[in-house]
Image: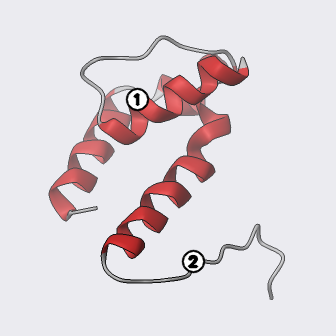
Amino acid sequence: MKRVKIKKTESYIQGHIGLFWTQVALSPLSVDALAPPIVKEMLSAGISAGVGSMAAVAGGIAEYVGKGLLERGCNEVGRSSGGIR
């Protein structure tokens, strides 16, 4: 993801903090047409699973990072759920 996209996403989240850090984040929310693509996908995933946007944050970021690495020639991507020390 290019730095401009990251800044737009950060700015959107700061302006819509309720999507991620309040009780509202525990229930599915409608997709905002003005949201950055990663946020739209998180909101859509929440609707599909019947949960709030917070449930899709880690997976959404991991997916975007993985796709970016693959686009740059990386053949394998691994992830840890915090179990590696």
* Res. 71 image quadrant: bottom left
The quarter of the displayed image where residue 68 is located: bottom left
Q: Quadrant of the N terminus?
A: bottom left
How far across and how far down the image is residue 52, in percent? 65, 24
Residue 51 at least partly seen: no
Spot the residue most to the bottom.
85
Crowdedness near tag 2: few (<14), some (14–19) or many (≥20) residues, C-alpha within 10 Å? few
- Mark-to-mark CA distance, 1 and 2: 23 Å
**For residue 65, side relative to residue 9 (left or right):** right
Disc 2 designates what residue? 77
Q: State the residue at coordinates (15%, 56%).
A: 4
- Front of the two marks 1 and 2: 2
The residue under the point 80% across, 84% down is 84
The amino acid at mark 1 is Lys
Quadrant location, the C terminus: bottom right
Name the residue beneath numbered marker 1: 40
Q: Please say whether residue 3 is visible from this viewpoint.
A: yes
Q: Amino acid at mark 2?
A: Val
> Which image quadrant is residue 54 in?
top right
Dot 1 lies on which element?
helix
The structure residue drawn at horizontal position 53% and vertical position 47%, both measured from the top left corner, is 60
Give the mark nearest the N terminus, 1 or 2.
1
Do the residues under discs 1 and 2 have CB atoms within 8 angstroms? no
* Residue 6 higher or lower than 38, as above or below: below
Say if 45 sits above or below 9 in the image: above
Q: Residue furthest right?
A: 83
Q: Position of residue 48 (x, y in %)?
A: 64, 20
